[in-house]
Amino acid sequence: MTWDTIILGAGAAGMMCATQTGGRTLVLDHAKAPGEKIRISGGGRCNFTNMYAGPENFLSGNPHFCKSALSRYTQWDFIDLITAHGIAYHEKTLGQLFCDTTAKDIVAMLRAEITKSGAELWLETAITNVTHDGTSFAVTVEKSGRREALTCTNLVLATGGKSIPKMGATGLAYDIARQFGLAVKDTRAGLVPFTFSDGRFKAISGLSHPVRATAGETTFDEALLFTHRGLSGPAMLQISSYWHEGQPITLDLFPDADPFEVLRTRRQGYGRRNLSTELATLLPARLAELLTDQWQLTGNLADQSDVALRALCDRLHGWTMTPSGTEGYRTAEVTLGGIDTNALSSKTMEAKAMPGLFVIGEAVDVTGWLGGFNFQWAWSSGWAAGQAIAARP
Ligand code: FDA
């Protein structure tokens, strides 16, 4: 069975790539259905891109690497594609675009485009071995209990990262990359909730509040969600990608205003109010209660000097804590790290030292923020590799 191109992985990047390659292209996946992460993403509506997507929204050992693909297949190109397929969409917030109806429309669109391009898709296919003889790749697979020996000129690694093993995520792309001498940067879970082993937020789980979250030099203004096991919500997921084990994070509970003057003024009219009651006029009551307990705040408003009020406000702006860890790959939306961008051409996604080998999507050491950026990287990198393959003699 000889193919021009074999794409390992029928996720977002692999499917997009298959729409472009031309020639005899085969897409392989061990899952029952293609694009499973697309289907479940965005609460079933898929946050498929972001209107403001740019290189600054990505983490990578080389922040310049993603520029070429992102600029050649942009969010507007993908929007044109879904518009041509009659898929209605809307902006939810911060440029994040979602399907009006269902994420399944995007999977169906990609399947239709693959069929149009003439590529084949084999599902429930286990990839058991990959070798290269200096000219072509040999890929051994098992399908319906049968072993098949396939060969191809171009091999595309598109099996994604390690996030959510229950959905079929594996480290296959990393293993094959290492086998062919490509460096792989250490991986860790990204866009993932924080855990606290003492369950300190159990009492207020479900409560949400807008914050400015900081880890190291990086800051995000978004909502925080307290959970049984720790902290989640967009602000925490975003900051988790910049966080390292043992590092503190800081929450500003008043990102847009300083409550100091309000508290000073209230001290005159409501001096006999205790601090906890007063805080509950500024913050959700259950959060105010938790802070009063944890910080052992006592006394009435009238008892607080300007210095004490200032110190309280500083604590509200800079609530610092060190998470025990994160929920890990079990629930992470993405995998940080991956195949070293130094090993790849940023224009074609082809391995510099191994012509014919391409790596796209989340398997590459390029990780987007929350908000549609990871799918945009999958579309852009998949398209770039597909175009490069189509242009090969
Ligand atoms: P992807 O993971 O999509 O595809 C990899 C494919 O390879 C899968 O089909 C898998 O079955 C297959 N595969 C893996 N190992 C294999 C093996 N050993 N043999 C054969 N096949 C194998 N991003 C975003 O921009 N907006 C969003 O709304 C969301 N929402 C979201 C929700 C959840 C719950 C998750 C987990 C993730 C998101 N993401 C997201 C991230 C986004 O889903 C992710 O970045 C892209 O799907 C990555 O695309 P890839 O094609 O690289 O991998």
Image (cartoon, helix red, strand yellow):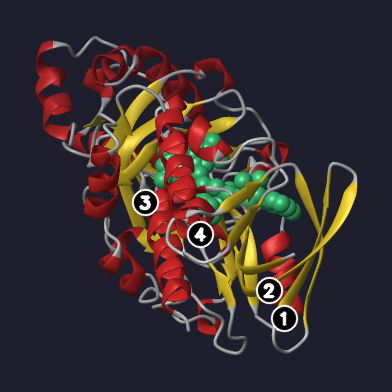
Give the numbered dot on residue 361: 4
Task: Please tell me which residue is depicted at 40% across the width and 28% down the height of the picture.
Answer: 45
Foreground pick, 190 / 326? 190
Q: Amino acid at mark 4?
A: Gly
Q: Amino acid at mark 1?
A: Phe
- Which residue corresponds to mark 3? 373
Foreground pick, 257 / 41? 41
The reply to whether discs 2 and 3 touch (Cβ–Cβ < 8 Å) is no
Cα–Cα span, label 2 and label 1: 5 Å
Tell me if residue 59 comes above or below residue 202 in the rendering: below
> Is the residue indicated by label 1 positioned so its CB lies within 8 Å of ligand 1?
no
Q: Is residue 36 visible?
A: yes
The quadrant in which residue 316 appears is: top left
Q: Earlier in the sequence, mark 3 or mark 1?
A: 1
Cα–Cα span, label 3 and label 1: 29 Å
Q: Amino acid at mark 2?
A: Ala
Graded by Cα atoms within 10 Å as few (under 14), some (14 to 19) or many (20 or more), the crowding at tag 4 reads many
Q: Is residue 59 visible?
A: no
Q: Amino acid at mark 3?
A: Phe
Task: Please tell me which residue is depicted at 54% across the width and 41% down the height of the picture.
Answer: 35
> Is the residue indicated by label 3 positioned so its CB lies within 8 Å of ligand 1?
yes
- Which residue corresponds to mark 1? 180
SS of the residue under disc 4: helix
> Is the residue indicated by label 4 positioned so its CB lies within 8 Å of ligand 1?
yes
